[in-house]
């Protein structure tokens, strides 16, 4: 009778997610192995913005060195150019971010150019889902802070449902809730670990800024360096969360 009970306990035991340190190690390993492919996709998003950025920079210089009505005209033109460049940067760089998801979906085998082209049809679904998720979390925040935080975690897999299951809008959000059901605390713990590691890393990288004069050339240069570093290591967070997502998908089957 005792053996039967032990067997039943084994059969009905709750499947476990991959240990957090193993997830992190795997995410870093995959990121490093495929960093060249990730950078190629990033480059596809950067290229279309280089000329607008250059034009805006030149107009900014002219607006500073030229006085009078002509200088004012350059300032106005530079402002318009900067606004247009910002819109273009958001569009193309967001597609680069989406391209990393597709790279993972294709098991890192497709060419960067082809992968990036496919992101065009996913831009608006991604933006729409991001806005919808943000709005829902904000609504929960307006009620109480804690529910807002809870639902931010619950909705955290909606973007993965979009890219890997072709779910859109509320369907992606409902799918995220379905995936995380029964594993909220395990998932939250892993994501909090990721946030803590990211915070510690960025604090270390940003530490030299404390000894630099505010708004100095050195501080601005280091700030730019910090932004580049955060941009480069960003996919680690995506790969980390993707591993949790795949674990949950396997469990839910």
Image (cartoon, grey):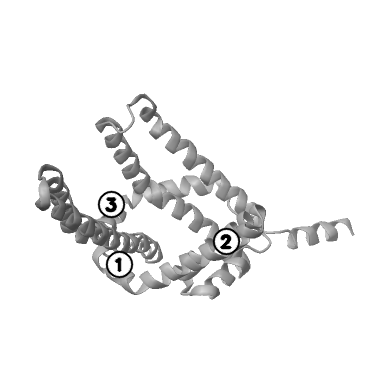
Residues under labels 1 and 2: Cα distance?
31 Å
User: Would residue 201 be visible to someone looking at this image?
Assistant: yes
Most extreme residue toward the right, as rendered? 1
Q: Nearer the viewer, residue 95 or 19?
A: 95
Task: Count the marks.
Answer: 3
Q: Relative to 79, is 227 on the left or the right?
A: right
Secondary-structure class at tag 1: helix
Q: Closer to the observer: label 2 or label 3?
A: 2
Q: Position of residue 203 (x, y in %)?
A: 45, 34
> Residue 36's mark?
3
> Residue 115's mark?
1
For the N terminus, the image quarter is bottom right
Secondary-structure class at tag 2: helix
Of pointers 1 and 3, the one earlier in the residue sequence? 3
For the C terminus, the image quarter is bottom right
Of pointers 2 and 3, the one earlier in the residue sequence? 3
Q: Residue at x 38, y 72 (%)?
A: 124
Q: Position of residue 153 (x, y in %)?
A: 59, 57
Most extreme residue toward the top, as rendered? 211
| Crowd class of label 2 (few under 14; some 14 to 19; many from 20; radius 10 Å) | many
Q: Nearer the viewer, residue 135 or 229?
A: 135
In the image, residue 186 sits, relative to residue 223, either above or below, namely below
Secondary-structure class at tag 3: helix
Of pointers 1 and 2, the one earlier in the residue sequence? 1
| Crowd class of label 3 (few under 14; some 14 to 19; many from 20; radius 10 Å) | few
- Label 2–label 3 contact, CB within 8 A: no
Q: Nearer the viewer, residue 111 or 117?
A: 117
Residues under labels 1 and 3: Cα distance?
14 Å
Residues under labels 2 and 3: Cα distance?
35 Å
Q: Relative to 222, is 16 on the left or the right?
A: right
- Which residue is tagged 2? 137
Q: Position of residue 189 (x, y in %)?
A: 61, 48
């Amino acid at each position: 009778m005792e053996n039967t009970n032990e067997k039943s306990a084994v059969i009905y035991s709750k499947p476990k997610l991959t240990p957090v340190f193993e997830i992190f190690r795997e995410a870093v390993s995959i990121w490093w192995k495929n960093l060249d492919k990730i950078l190629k996709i990033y480059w596809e998003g950067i290229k279309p913005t280089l000329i607008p950025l250059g034009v805006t920079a030149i107009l900014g210089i002219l607006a500073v060195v030229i006085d009078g009505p002509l200088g004012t005209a350059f300032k106005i033109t530079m402002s318009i150019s900067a606004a247009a460049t910002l819109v273009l940067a958001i569009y193309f760089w967001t597609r680069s971010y989406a391209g990393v998801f597709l790279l993972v979906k294709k098991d890192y085998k497709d060419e960067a150019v082809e992968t990036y082209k496919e992101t065009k049809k996913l831009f608006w679904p991604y933006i729409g889902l991001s806005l919808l998720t943000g709005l829902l979390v904000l609504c929960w925040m307006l009620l109480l802070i804690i529910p807002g935080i809870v639902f931010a975690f619950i909705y955290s897999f909606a973007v993965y449902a979009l890219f890997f299951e072709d779910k859109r809008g509320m369907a992606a959000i409902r799918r995220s809730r379905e995936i995380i059901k029964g594993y909220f605390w395990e998932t939250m713990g892993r994501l909090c670990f990721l946030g803590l590691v990211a915070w510690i890393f960025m604090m270390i990288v940003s530490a030299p800024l404390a000894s630099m004069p505010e708004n100095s050339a050195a501080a601005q240069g280091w700030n730019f360096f910090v932004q580049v570093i955060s941009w480069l290591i960003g996919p680690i967070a995506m790969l980390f969360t993707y591993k949790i997502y795949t674990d949950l998908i396997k469990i839910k089957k």
